[in-house]
Image (cartoon, grey):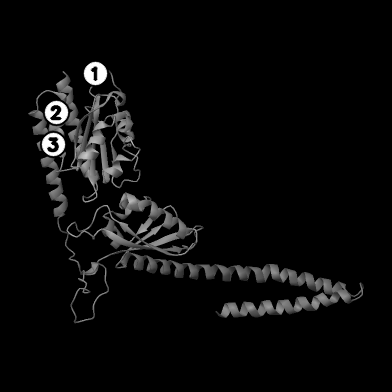
Amino acid sequence: MADVEEYGADLAAFRRRVEELRTARALPSSEALPALDAALFELQHAAEVLWPRYEELAAAGKRNGGRDDAHEHQLLRALFQRLPVAVALLDRDGVVRRLNVAATQLFGMRPGYATGRALAGSFTHEGRPTFRSQVAAVARGEGARSLHVQLLRPPDRSSPRSGALRATLTALRPPQEPRTAVLTVFQTYGDTAPSAPGRGGPAAVRREPAPAEQPATARPALTEMTRHAELLDLIDDMATALLTAPPARDAVAARAAAVLHGRFADWVILDTGGKSETLCRSAVLASSGEVRDAVSAQAPAASPVVADAVDRRAGVLQARLEDPDAFGCDETGAPLLVRAEASSLLCVPLSTGTTGTEPDSGPDSPSTVQGALTLLRTGGRSAFELAEAGAVDRMARHIAFALRRSEM
């Protein structure tokens, strides 16, 4: 602070001397030479003394300000993560930039997976256009908005309104960024203010232990172990069904679909034939009769996700459906995924190869593609995960071998 005051005093004195030198223009030319020498001296003083001192003070201010800003940013990030309500920072297209802890629990997504993906994929199909439009309007500066959305995966299936959310959107300009972001707060219909101390009632909120209160000892992930055991049982049941199936293509497809339907997926669609242009729909298992008939009548080649999986020999995992036309449309042009109320999709090729990337060398090639397996889950179930996709890829290989045996 003393250095700043001293520099200010020197600068004020320099300005006064410059003002006095400006009056030298009225002197005769024979007497103006000493004033010119003094002006050159003042310029040298400004260049060699005043300017270097200004640079030192500016650099010191940036260092102190940088430390203060970094501390402030850390504090804001900590507050954002510890907020008891679900908060998401979105761009003008509704793509997630940041989720706090409560939001990751509400949407059932990890922060690393959610970042860079459209948040509208977590809502039912009818609410996605409205949500995107409102986010874009807030980003354009048209004021804060509030709307209702419905989760594809309700947190509590026993409550019919547990998946209903109120989304409050407001514009936010992050520091040092050129574009406006949209801060979105999500509240479930069960969120209420806590009651006064000593009083019970419906407004009481169950207290969750703080992270610091959690036991320091590591506990086994029992949920993941249980899920892993379930996948192993599913693979074993699939192998048993295929080994005991009659050597016929339709019988193999029916056995495989029966193992997966209900237990693992709400929709099971098996397309067999070898190439996308010659595929035929061998099995369709679902609970909805009218929509099931529309899916059964669809040509597999008209389904973009099936044709892509067969042509590229690579699986397609869409944990949160963002493109309603991914599986194709019915005769009226309505997306089949919307009619089926699908929330998650997994499509894998039925390939007998180990990697699915080797070139074909004939009908008996170890990498021949026998078709595609498509699985859908509806809004009441959790989205497909990578571990489940790996298990389905193994089962698809077993199905491909069974189909190949039936042809031989």
| Neighbour tally class for label 3: few under 14, some 14-19, many 20 plus, Cα within 10 Å | some
Instruction: Provide the residue designation for mark 2.
Output: 252
Of residues 236 and 201, which is closer to you in this image?
201
Q: Quadrant of residue 78?
A: bottom left
- Where disc 2 sits, the SS reads helix
Q: Amino acid at mark 3?
A: Ala
Q: Amino acid at mark 1?
A: Pro
| Residue 145 on image: x %, y % | 41, 63
- Residue in the image at 16% along x and 62% along y: 217
Distance between mark 1 and mark 2 Cα atoms:
19 Å
Instruction: Provide the residue designation for mark 3.
Output: 258
- Where disc 3 sits, the SS reads helix
| Neighbour tally class for label 1: few under 14, some 14-19, many 20 plus, Cα within 10 Å | few
Asked if residue 384 shows in the view, the reply is no
- Residue in the image at 16% along x and 35% along y: 257
Of residues 188 and 206, which is closer to you in this image?
188
